[in-house]
Image (cartoon, grey):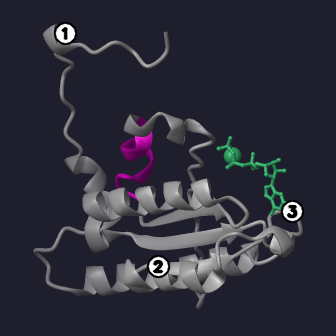
């Protein structure tokens, strides 16, 4: 892209977002996040908003945020108006995209735009003052590893 070879490493939470505590494993050190909701499912939009809230609280402006309304092939049963989703995305500094994974619509455009946004962000952050350490390569190194306190051990989520 723009004369540069770009390799994206993509982590899919693959249903594990049910175990909310696992979230940081996916988003720490990431340059971009894709939060997907189903345009025919209000609950999925609420969950997407919660993820955006967490990503913003944990990573601030360090991450490029994409909010994706998927299943746009099911326009007839849409419950989340496009205007509402776009206005929400704008209000949180994210960008909204519409896709249909089923019909392969909008997916390539989404990844190309995300890559473009991440590249321009990394150029800005690396060309800024040298005492900034906001590039992803060194962000990973700052993850604290805290030993588990057995006296404070909670019941596991899987019983
Ligand atoms: N009509 C339509 N159905 C879709 C589309 N994308 C996914 N689906 C269907 O929606 C259901 C859920 O899709 P998944 O890809 O399993 O969703 P997911 O969010 O990755 O689910 P987890 O990996 O379990 O978190 C499946 O039945 C898919 O076939 C789409 O663009 N249009
Ligand atoms: Mg999945």
Residue nearest the viewer, comparing 82 with 98: 82
Q: Of the two numbered discs 2 and 3 on the same chain, state the one appearing first in sequence.
A: 2
Q: Is residue 23 magenta?
A: yes
Residue at disc 1, secondary structure: helix
Residue at 60% x, 48% y is 12
The residue to which callout 3 is attached is 102
> Residue 155 lies in what quarter of the image?
top left
Measured from the top left, where is residue 27 in percent x and y?
Answer: 41, 53
The residue to which callout 1 is attached is 150
Q: Quadrant of the N terminus?
A: bottom right
What whole-number distance in Å separates the C-alpha atoms at marks 1 and 3? Answer: 46 Å
Residue at disc 2, secondary structure: helix
What whole-number distance in Å separates the C-alpha atoms at marks 2 and 1? Answer: 42 Å
Q: Quick check: is the Cβ at mark 2 less than 8 Å away from ligand 1? A: no
Between disc 2 and disc 1, the foreground one is 2
- Residue 74 is marked as none
Q: Is residue 114 magenta?
A: no
Q: Is residue 13 above or below residue 52?
A: above
Q: Is residue 5 above or below residue 156?
A: below
Q: Of the two numbered discs 1 and 3 on the same chain, state the one appearing first in sequence.
A: 3
Residue at 21% x, 86% y is 128
Q: Quick check: is the Cβ at mark 3 less than 8 Å away from ligand 1? A: yes
For the record, the magenta segment spans 22-30
The residue to which callout 2 is attached is 88
Residue at 19% x, 22% y is 147
What main secondary structure does the magenta stretch of the protein show? helix
Measured from the top left, where is residue 154 in percent x and y?
Answer: 28, 15
Q: Is residue 50 left or right of residue 46?
A: left
What whole-number distance in Å separates the C-alpha atoms at marks 2 and 3? Answer: 25 Å
| Residue 25 visible from this viewpoint | yes
Q: How many marks?
A: 3
Measured from the top left, where is residue 15 in percent x and y?
Answer: 61, 39
């Amino acid at each position: 892209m723009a004369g540069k070879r770009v390799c994206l490493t993509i982590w899919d939470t693959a249903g594990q977002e049910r175990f909310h505590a696992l979230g940081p494993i996916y988003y720490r050190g990431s340059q971009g996040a894709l939060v997907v909701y189903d345009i025919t499912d209000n609950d999925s939009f609420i969950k997407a908003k919660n993820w955006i809230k967490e990503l913003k609280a944990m990573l601030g402006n360090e991450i490029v945020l994409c909010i994706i309304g998927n299943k746009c092939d099911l326009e007839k049963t849409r419950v989340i108006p496009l205007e509402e989703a776009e206005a929400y995305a704008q209000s949180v500094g994210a960008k909204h995209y519409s896709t249909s994974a089923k019909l392969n619509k909008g997916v390539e455009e989404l990844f190309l735009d995300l890559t473009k946004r991440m590249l321009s962000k990394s150029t800005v952050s690396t060309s800024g003052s040298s005492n900034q350490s906001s590039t992803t390569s060194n962000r990973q190194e700052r993850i604290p590893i805290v030993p588990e306190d057995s006296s404070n051990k909670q019941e596991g989520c899987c019983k």
